[in-house]
């Protein structure tokens, strides 16, 4: 009986976690996992686990293997990710992009250093009253698909697109936030001549003590700002 209870608890815990294995292009999810999305480490790809150490290189793409394919998306169009099992913890969902150098292979480029800009954020809905841990405050919570609009003036070229869902259910103290991360590979067409920024690095963009990574049980929060730079509007 004790063994059965342990198995059930492990299964329930795994089910409560999630991953982002597919892109959504022109409203259509890719037909299989890990096509234009780099396969994450086995702790996420198989077990739906998260990153919790903001100083880890896993904060970049949680990458387990090199990329295989590159999707094409036009600047100004929506780009999304499928959340397998749905986003099962409350918190913000954010999107970053990094331009792949012309002489680099998109399948193996590491995107280290200050190369990422924030291209979208689905954060808390500010009502003026106490914020909660439900869908009324967090629009991405329980969603199976999340998306942002590729900035119209982003230059054409190849990019890594990083999605992160920040789970705050255990973030009463620094280090308690969980990050569910994937990186998609896209070729942006019909772009503009904008200069995206500010540019940040992963790891490096966040500190465990950032207010956006802490969710106290009391007193109730009445405002929230997601971690990282402002969204580049393009």
Image (spheres, rainbow, N blue to C red):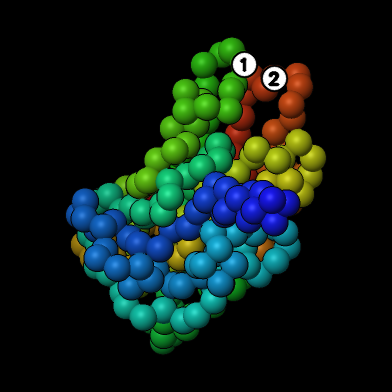
- At x 70% / y 33%, what residue is drawn? 215
Compared with 97, 136 (above or below) is above
Q: Earlier in the sequence, mark 2 or mark 1?
A: 1
Kind of element beneath mark 1: loop
Residue 185 vs residue 230, the one in the foreground: 185
Which residue position holds label 1? 130
Residue 95 image label: none
Q: Residue at x 66, y 63 (%)?
A: 203
Residue 99 in view, yes or no: no
Q: Position of residue 25 (x, y in %)?
A: 24, 58
> Where residue 95 appears, x then y in whole percent?
46, 52
> Is residue 147 placed above or below 220 in the rendered structure?
below
| Relative horizontal placement of residue 43, taking residue 185 as reference (left or right) | right
Q: Which residue is mark 2?
A: 220
Q: Position of residue 74 (x, y in %)?
A: 23, 59
- Disc 2 crowd rating (10 Å Cα; few below 14, some 14-19, many 20+) is few
Q: Residue at x 27, y 50 (%)?
A: 78
Count neighbours of disc 1 (C-alpha within 10 A) and say few if under 14, some if 14 to 19, many if 20 or more. few
User: Would you say the residues marked 2 and 1 are in contact, meaning their CB atoms lie under 8 Å apart?
Assistant: yes
Q: Closest to the observer: 205 or 147?
A: 147
Q: Could you tell whether 179 is left or right of 148 in the image?
A: right
Distance of label 2 from label 1 (alpha carbons): 6 Å
Marker count (numbered)? 2
Q: Residue at x 69, y 19 (%)?
A: 220
Horizontal side of residue 11 vs 66, given as left or right:
right
Residue 135 against residue 184 in the figure, above or below: above
What secondary structure is found at the residue carrying circle 2? loop
């Amino acid at each position: 009986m004790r063994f059965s209870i342990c198995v059930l608890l492990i299964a329930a815990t795994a089910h409560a976690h999630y991953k982002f294995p597919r892109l959504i292009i022109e409203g259509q999810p890719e037909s299989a996992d890990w096509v234009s999305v780099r396969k994450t480490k086995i702790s996420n790809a198989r077990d739906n686990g998260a990153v919790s150490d903001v100083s880890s290189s896993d904060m970049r793409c949680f990458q387990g293997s090199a990329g295989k394919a590159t999707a094409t998306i036009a600047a100004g169009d929506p780009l999304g990710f499928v959340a397998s099992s749905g986003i099962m913890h409350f918190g913000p969902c954010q999107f970053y992009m990094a331009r792949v150098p012309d002489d680099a292979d998109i399948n193996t480029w590491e995107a280290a250093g200050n190369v990422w800009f924030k291209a979208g954020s689905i954060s808390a809905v500010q009502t003026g009253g106490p914020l909660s841990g439900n869908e009324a405050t967090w629009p991405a919570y329980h969603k199976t698909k999340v998306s942002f609009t590729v900035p119209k003036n982003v230059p054409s070229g190849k990019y890594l697109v990083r999605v992160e869902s920040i789970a705050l259910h255990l973030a009463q103290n620094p280090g308690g936030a969980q990050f569910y991360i994937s990186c998609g590979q896209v070729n942006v067409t019909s772009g503009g001549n904008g200069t995206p920024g500010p540019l940040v690095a992963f790891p490096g963009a966040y500190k465990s003590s950032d207010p956006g990574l802490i969710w106290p049980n009391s007193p109730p929060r009445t405002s929230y700002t997601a971690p990282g730079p402002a969204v580049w509007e393009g």
